[in-house]
Image (cartoon, rainbow, N blue to C red):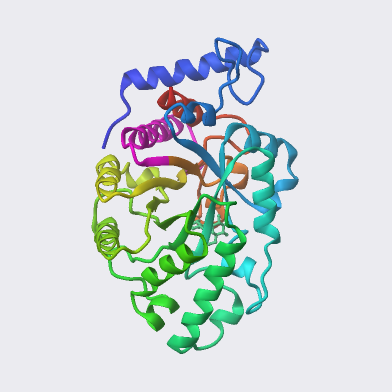
Amino acid sequence: MRTTTTRSRTRLRLAGALATVLVAAGIATGPAAAHAEGKPQTLADLAQRHGRYFGSATDNPELVDEPYKAILGSEFDQITPGNGMKWYATEPQQGVFDWSQGDEIVNLARANHQKVRGHTLVWHSQLPGWLTSREWTAPELRAVLKKHIQAEVRHYRGKVFAWDVVNEAFNEDGTYRETVFYKTLGPGYIADALRWAHQADPKVKLYLNDYNIESVGAKSDAYYELAKELRAQGVPLHGIGLQAHLALQYGYPTTLEDNLRRFSRLGLDTALTEVDIRMYVPADEAKLATQAEWYRDLTEACLAVRRCVGITLWDYTDKYSWIPAFFDGEGAALPWDEQLARKPAYFAIREALR
Ligand code: 9MR
């Protein structure tokens, strides 16, 4: 694991101190510190100079929060709906589709000139009750899955640039997760899902997406092998999404860059799709400094690999992070705090992007 060097710690402190001085002097009041030529540089501006995007997830209930929306709309050039395009939201009754939440996100993105990652078509979680509350034969479930995928991909054709087609298909040890789709249809459901999505929108980039695959290891090896096989069979798979829900207590995934690179060599794009770095709360200066270091390292890892196309935070502020509700005693995972103030992590990302 890379440790926080004295030099980078000093750089961080200086960056933080400089920002404080600029804000106090009324020089830097916008979402980003003023650039030398006077043009404010956002994370998106900086990422674009490397041919990457810098994005954030967002969720429909938050869109009434105007200060939140202002930063979401200015700092990022890509957004992902945190929940609005999931199966329970889009097909609440069998064959009855509701695009309202996803459309709200797409319309917001259009107003802010942002691109959208579609998330997600096939997942074992957040499924509608009508799907989980009964048994299905293989032909029945196949038809249900195909219809859902194609209706959704068709609806968002030209509006999303990428889809997380199958989400979280593997267990930690690299075996297939025993989801209703796997148990009923066998492992071929993944190739089928990709083919059906491709039929519905031949231009959209199709991804498999998962957590704990940032490092080289059993779970990411499973994706590597599957991806190789799918590519060899001509199945339309274009990218692997590494969620990157990291936690300080588990250590930094030091093989991230190598891992991204091996997927590139298969001819695949990669993306960091749901980044957050949680810690035990309360946060303190040391933990925030380590967190900042990790945000810098993962940004640098993506920039170092040509086919790593962009980075998405799993929302940008601790105010709307999923972490406290899911991990008791943990939080403070994002580069903006609950008051929408920028944390050391924000300045570290900027440094990495410069
Ligand atoms: O951010 C999402 C949160 O609002 C939901 O309650 C949660 C339910 O599982 O899903 C969160 O997003 C998940 C994403 O869709 C897939 N990867 C893990 C994310 C965090 O749970």
Measuring from the top left, give residue 242's x and y in whole percent.
39, 50
The dominant secondary structure in magenta is: helix
Say whether residue 231 is visible. yes
User: Measuring 73% from the left and 42% from the top, which residue is drawn there?
Assistant: 65
User: Measuring 55% from the left and 62% from the top, which residue is drawn there?
Assistant: 153
Q: Quadrant of residue 184?
A: bottom left
Q: Is residue 289 magenta?
A: yes
Viewer-proximal residue among 98 and 272: 98
Q: Quadrant of residue 50?
A: top left
Determine whether 177 is above or below 347 in the image.
Answer: below
Measuring from the top left, give residue 83's x and y in whole percent.
59, 58
Measuring from the top left, give residue 109's x and y in whole percent.
64, 44
Q: Is residue 285 magenta?
A: yes
Measuring from the top left, give residue 320's x and y in whole percent.
61, 47
User: Measuring 24% from the left and 54% from the top, which residue is drawn there?
Assistant: 217
Quadrant of the drawing holding the N terminus = top left
Q: Which residues are magenta?
A: 280-309
Determine whether 32 is above or below 109 in the image.
Answer: above
Q: Is residue 99 left or right of residue 321?
A: right
